[in-house]
Amino acid sequence: MKQGAGLFCTAFLLVLLSVTAFAGDGIEHRAIEISNDYEFTVENGVCSGSGTLDDPYIIENWIIDAGYDTYGIRIHGTTRAFIIRNVEISGASKSAIYLSYVKNGKIENCTIEGNWVGITLNFSSLNRISGTTLANNTDGIRFYFSSSNQILRNTFEGNEAAIWLDASNENELIGNYIADGYTGVYLNLDSELNLILGNAFLNNARHAYTDDPNIWDDGFSGNYWGGFTSIDADENGIWDHSYQISTDGDQDNFPLMTHPLVPAPPPAECEV
């Protein structure tokens, strides 16, 4: 970023500090809409970066109460690299974060709670969602025609569907905690060859659903499925029977007995 833009960014933040309320380390901000590569500006919440892979635009430390707004952050038709980081969004009537026809975006360490959809990707690829908490949304993450993205180490709690993919292929869903919803992972409309690995599914009415072939283990280990038990004759920490996902043959062949994100049950005690 040029020096003049950096000075303006600093001045803009100082003004915000004087007129907005703090909550933790965040600052209140209006809903953000970016419709092309030239709208990554200070006015749109961007205060560093040049949009390259090595120096992405940074949108961070905002608190957005979308109220009756459709979106908290909407980015459409861009190719420049960006990171949305440490942002809290609530109240969006459609989606807290909506990425459409976007590449090279990252969403990191955000809190997305109480929206219709937490994060939506539409015709988007090569994006990553990581370390984010999505709670009490109707749906946590929705993909439409979006492939080759990553959903890594996020926490999903109390969403009707945690992750819902429509016509989206070859995405990676790895290391997520998916709990207390109706459906954990829902793969629909020819969503194929998605890798679902190392996730913890807990207290969902239905952990997973798919009509098409996807990948639920790497040949050595799979996912943790709350409520599923079998035997572990060789004591390797993997249940000896597969966990069935669909009647068409999709299954986790190496379901995990334990998971680091799931507390171990208390030891059994004899009643006196």
Image (cartoon, rainbow, N blue to C red):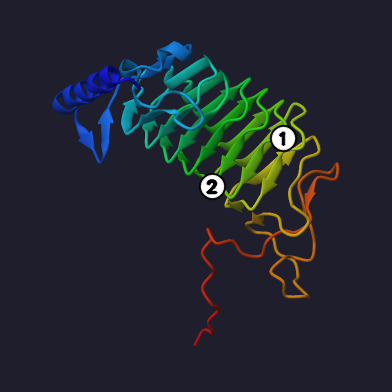
Please state which of residues 147 and 156 is positioned toward the viewer in this rendering: 147
Q: Residue at the spot x=72%, y=65% of the render?
A: 238
Please state which of residues 75 and 265 is positioned toward the viewer in this rendering: 75
Query: SS of the residue at dot 1?
Result: loop
Quarter of the image with the N terminus in it: top left
Residue 26 vertical placement versus 250 (above, below): above
Q: Amino acid at mark 2?
A: Arg
Q: Quadrant of residue 242?
A: bottom right
Residue 227 horizontal/vertical position (percent): 65, 59
Residue 263 has which mark? none
Q: Residue furthest right?
A: 248
Asked whether the viewer can see residue 249, the reply is yes
Query: SS of the residue at dot 2?
Result: loop
Please state which of residues 63 and 47 is positioned toward the viewer in this rendering: 47
Residue 141 horizontal/vertical position (percent): 56, 33
Q: Which residue is mark 1?
A: 170
Q: Residue at the spot x=42%, y=23% of the render?
A: 50
Instruction: Tell me which numbered mark, 1 or 2, is placed earlier along the sequence.
Output: 2
Q: Quadrant of residue 123?
A: top right
Q: Residue at the spot x=57%, y=31% of the render?
A: 127
Q: Which residue is mark 2?
A: 153
Residue 117 vertical placement versus 259 (above, below): above
| Mark 1 to mark 2 CA distance (whole Å) | 17 Å
Instruction: Decide if residue 241 is on the left or right side of residue 60.
Output: right
Residue 88 horizontal/vertical position (percent): 36, 34
Instruction: Decide if residue 47 is on the left or right side of residue 131.
Output: left
Instruction: Decide if residue 202 is on the left or right side of residue 246.
Output: left
Q: Amino acid at mark 1?
A: Glu
Q: Residue at the spot x=50%, y=33% of the render?
A: 106
Instruction: Decide if residue 10 is on the left or right side of residue 195.
Output: left
Q: Residue furthest front?
A: 3
